[in-house]
Amino acid sequence: MNSQFNLNIKTPCSENFNKFLPTPGGGFCGSCKKEVINFTKMNAQETITYFKNHSTQNTCGRFKNTQLKTYTPKRKKLSFLSSVGIACLSVLSIFTAQAQDTKKQKVSLDSNTKEVNVSEFQKSFIVKGNVSDESIPLPGVNILLEGTTTGTTTDFDGNFQFPIKLKKGDVLVFSYIGMESQKVTIMNENSASNIELKIDMKMDSCFIMGKVAVKEVYKSKRN
């Protein structure tokens, strides 16, 4: 896909994205039995790259209305060595983040004794709570463990119980259409017992979901 192309959704989907089972790229729709890619978190270049690498596949996506437009791919590409470098930086970042979750080991070199204080076996616990908009419970709120695809949603009364045990320092991300996303650092089993989401006053676009129509834009060969 070297030329300009236009993205459009001819028939919007009415399914609730917040109730989809989370996937690496977005969510799994139980009705059409396929993954719906969440493009709302992507910038223009990431969107171009996705459709360049998936030009032969039918894609269902979730977009902001401002993202359904004409895109012009950049000619500059990353070299193989650059790609390897980025991959190495990503691995290093993950390793660093994991290292910060454990306490430092103290070793006394002046004597024959060693003082070791390592929390490799941190206590884990079940986290559950309720999500509201300051007045009423919010059903269908998306709750994800930051950095993973593990998550759950609130029930009709706004209640939830996270499907896996968490440990101190884990971060849960709460998101809901029309509301500001909120990150909660887990310190104990009661850290997310009562979450209140606020209306997103900065939201200036709506979300559209459905099968994506990709159409190349005609470009004249005349000078």
Image (cartoon, grey):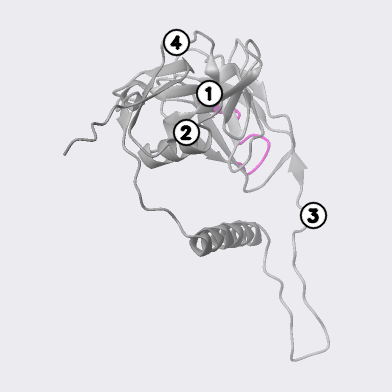
- Dominant SS in magenta: loop
Q: Earlier in the sequence, mark 3 or mark 1?
A: 1
Q: Which mark is residue 12?
A: 4
- Would you identify the image quadrant in which residue 157 lies? top right
Q: Which residues are magenta?
A: 186-195
Mark 2 — residue?
51
77 is higher (above) or lower (below) than 15: below
Q: CA distance from mark 1 to mark 2?
A: 9 Å
Outermost residue to the left: 223
Residue 165 location, x and y as percent? Answer: 74, 37
Q: Are marks 1 and 2 in contact (CB under 8 Å)?
A: yes
Outermost residue to the right: 112
Residue at figure coordinates x 63%, y 10% from the top left: 31
59 is higher (above) or lower (below) than 148: above
Q: Amino acid at mark 1?
A: Thr
| The C terminus sits in image quarter | top left
201 is higher (above) or lower (below) than 44: above
Residue 170 location, x and y as percent? Answer: 62, 45
Q: Secondary structure at mark 1?
A: loop
**Dot in front, 4 or 2:** 2
Q: Which mark is residue 121?
A: 3
Mark 1 — residue?
59
Residue at figure coordinates x 47%, y 33% from the top left: 51
Magenta span has 213? no
Q: Amino acid at mark 4?
A: Pro
Q: Nearer the viewer, residue 17 or 10?
A: 10
Q: Are marks 1 and 4 in contact (CB under 8 Å)?
A: no
Q: Earlier in the sequence, mark 1 or mark 4?
A: 4
Q: Secondary structure at mark 4?
A: loop
Q: Earlier in the sequence, mark 1 or mark 2?
A: 2
